[in-house]
Image: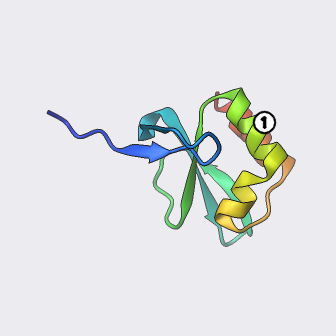
Amino acid sequence: MTHIPLRMCVVCREHKPAKDLIRITYNSDTGMAEPDKNCKNTGRGAYICKSAECIKKAKKKHVIERHLDCSTSDELYEKLEGLL
């Protein structure tokens, strides 16, 4: 039996396998949040579902900004929609 790591989406608060979520990390060099495509970046990360609905809610309610305590741009949400 293989262990499947579960992570919680910061928007809908559902637990899902980590491979089914998008990880977002804070980049201290740029001071902005960015998608972590390979899940290898160091530091605090936030997970979000691979759904347009969760991405729209995150943008509207500023969930990522609050969770990572950093600023985000519309470019981040465009990148997230591109990963769908």
Q: Viewer-proximal residue, 39 or 5?
A: 5
Residue 79 visible in the picture: yes
Above or below 75: residue 83: above
Q: Viewer-proximal residue, 56 or 39?
A: 56
Residue 63, given in percent of the width and then of the height, sits at: 72, 53
Q: Secondary structure at mark 1?
A: helix
* Residue 79 image-quadrant placement: top right
Above or below 2: residue 8: below
Residue reaching furthest front?
A: 13
Q: Amino acid at mark 1?
A: Lys
Where, quadrant-wise, is the C terminus in this rendering?
Answer: top right
The number of discs equals 1
The residue under label 1 is: 56
Residue 49, given in percent of the width and then of the height, sits at: 59, 36
Residue reaching furthest left?
A: 1
- Judged left or right of residue 20, residue 10 is right
Who's the residue at 74% across and 44% down the image?
58
Who's the residue at 47% across and 50% down the image?
39
- Judged left or right of residue 39, residue 34 is right
Who's the residue at 74% across and 69% down the image?
31
* Residue 52 image-quadrant placement: top right
Residue 76, given in percent of the width and then of the height, sits at: 76, 47
Residue 16, given in percent of the width and then of the height, sits at: 45, 36
Who's the residue at 65% across and 61% down the image?
67
Where, quadrant-wise, is the N terminus in this rendering?
Answer: top left
* Residue 66 image-quadrant placement: bottom right
Residue 75 visible in the picture: no
Above or below 47: residue 25: below
